Amino acid sequence: AAQPRAGSERNTLLQLGHDARGVFEDPFMLMVIGISITYYTVAQVRPLPDTIQTEPISLGEVVVFANKFPEKLKYVTQSIKVIKDKNALNNQPNAGDVLLNSGAVFVQKSQQGGSSPVIRGFEASRVLLMVDGVRMNNAIYRAGHLQNIITVDNTILDRMEVIYGPSSTLYGSDALGGVVSMYTKNPVLSKTDKSLVSGNALVRYATATQEARGHVDFNLASKKWASFTSITYGVFGDVIQGNQRQSAYPNFGLKPFYVQRVGTTDSAFVNPNPNKQVASDYRQVDIAQKILFQPSENIQHLLNIQVGNSSNVQRYDRLTETTSGTPVYAEWYYGPQVKNLMSYQFSANNLVGFFQDLKIIASYQNIEESRITRRFKNNNRDSRWESVNVWGLNMDAKHKSGKNELHLGLESYTNYVSSTAERMNLVSGALSRITTRYSDGPTKMSSNAIYAQHTYKINDAWTLNDGLRFNLVRLDARFADTTLMHFPFVRAEQNHAAITGNLGLVYASPKNFRLAFLLSSGFRSPNVDDLTKVFDTKTGYVVVPNKDLKPEYTYNAEVNFNKYSEHFNLGGSVFYTWFRNAIVVDKFQFNGQDSILYQGVKSAVFAPQNKANATVVGFSVNAMYKIDRQNSFDAVYTYTKGTYNSAGVTMPLDHIPPTFGRIGFKHESKIWVGEFYSLFNGWKKIGDYNPNGEDNQQYATVDGMPSWFILNLRGQVSLGNNLSAQVQVENLLDRNYRYFASGISAPG
């Protein structure tokens, strides 16, 4: 490969700890060392928080929002993970890393600016993301891997709830594997006649990712009005991966080259530090504004505005691909990911009448995404842009009468999708047409539903939960220009009706033991991404539209339990899910051909198809033991297995993670808190990969994805009444590791 030119931006390495060759002198510096300084105003001083979630000792203390209204866990049948500790929420690079470090959710990454949660073997458009009661999933959420969760600013998260298993009764389409529900901080009213001014600021730096992040928020309040404002800006550099590899895979994950355009020619330069994953950097800014008006004790009006934008986000995994030793791509990146969310929420409680509690949320979202690609030594840059406008309305009301609670709801979401594309020759500047990612004509998807959830408290120990939902989904996509792809149709139109439900029984003893039995169902209606996408998920492999897709359904049976005591908490779940009409990507014919020329490359034709009936089984167990008032131990472990039958052949289902979990020890005192913990993943053998799905064998070893564990240390110390410092040292052993299906190695 050619030598890099002087002054090359990509040739500039992190100076701290490097010698002249760009190699680390000090192995210690390969670890992720994160330093955070947090400042609170006097009005907001709080005691030194835990570094992990503090577990309650009574079942009656646990309150969850899985049913959209506050509910004690002992009456809820679903298995739920609650993350509410502020350090665990606010002191990670993004919201996906919050889930990852909990050890309770698997997260896939294709690039540093990405995080795709996997719940019980379901991922992306089969997992529902919610923020402040608003659906994030839209018409172009794909079935592969997503990065949308990082558009939620984790520095303002107040709590996260992960609902495991099909949850379509209350949440509708996409809640096949579960729901990740995120709640951001709300304005705080003054409790006196005096005005309240409070706020906090955080500065965070990490070495192995060169992360530099700053955050400030402030609260202005009177007795009836309050305003919360937040600004967060983060710069993330190229990720430096761990250097200690398994002996069988001494070169796994190394980045030996990077591409740079010199004049009008692409050249591949030698990467002086192959552990530095060049072209994994990005920047992000998030702004939030909330205004609360509470005219009386039981009435609230809340305006919620959240705006976010990013720099270009390099698709690192695709930039590592080579053919015959030559890079495949010179450029492959997501353009700035724009998120605009606005919602108005009306809440009323303790009402007189049939309904005692009422909540209405009206929302609008504008999401912009783009993909820019250019092959190595090719002057043509292809750009594809997507814009989605989503209007939403949720109405939820609760009626209480004796031993019965009835929750009724209405939900309506309408998506308008615009998809455009063009090719630009970098030398001549000439523009030309190329295929759009989705249908290029008017495209609309709407979902409307009514639902009811009922709770019957049989006696002090037994509670019955049952619910039913009726959903109508309509999609209309027009293909305005069929001259480039010669589609055999000009319109994809679908109308689907679905009925889903749940039935559960909970036993909660006075001795803080809870046992729940649950039957539930979920559905996912094909969206614009499923029906109209044209895209190459890897070189020589093109996915084309299939307008005959039908909805997917899941049917779930599970048993889950919790036991709380003064010193020991234990929980777990066992589940079996039947996945019917599963959409899988498989070989297909386009206009009678099994291969076509796409972007100048002869590519095998694939398409999403309802070809599989799958089963997913698994279990999870978690425990916390409080040794004494200052020391505790926690652990979580998850196992999942999924297979499907296609033409009489049993195949591994894609998206199924290996075993994973977390073990930790924590010490806390009035002055400081420290935690030593380990994250781990089991082997994912290559024979357990799905050959045609989204498991990304090309980014694993020849044997699959090796097992690994890492050791981490973090602590927090109080520097005064309103100042604290946190230090995190991650991957103490400098292990080289990569999460299953991911195309980028984790920090060293």
Image (spheres, helix red, strand yellow):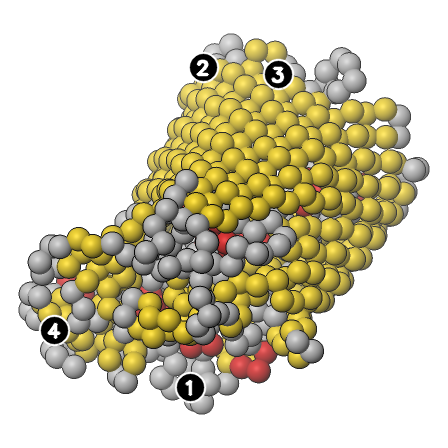
The residue pinned by badge 1 equals 249
Between the residue at mark 4 and the residue at mark 3, the CA separation in whole angstroms equals 64 Å
Of helix, strand and loop, which one carries label 3? strand
Quadrant where the C terminus is found in the figure: bottom left
User: Which mark's residue is nearer the viewer, 2 or 4?
Assistant: 4
Q: Tell me, for residue 299, which label it has, or none.
A: 3
Q: Nearer the N terminus, badge 2 or badge 4?
A: 4
Q: Residues within 10 Å of mark 4 (few under 14, many from 20)?
A: many
Q: Amino acid at mark 2?
A: Ser
Between the residue at mark 1 and the residue at mark 2, the CA separation in whole angstroms equals 62 Å
Between the residue at mark 3 and the residue at mark 2, the CA separation in whole angstroms equals 20 Å
Residue 482 sits above or below residue 670 on the image: below
The residue pinned by badge 2 equals 195
Q: Nearer the viewer, residue 90 or 578?
A: 578
Q: Residues within 10 Å of mark 3 (few under 14, many from 20)?
A: some
Of helix, strand and loop, which one carries label 4? loop
Residue 392 sits above or below residue 556 on the image: above
Judge whether residue 4 can be spotted in this image.
yes
The residue pinned by badge 4 equals 4
Of helix, strand and loop, which one carries label 2? loop
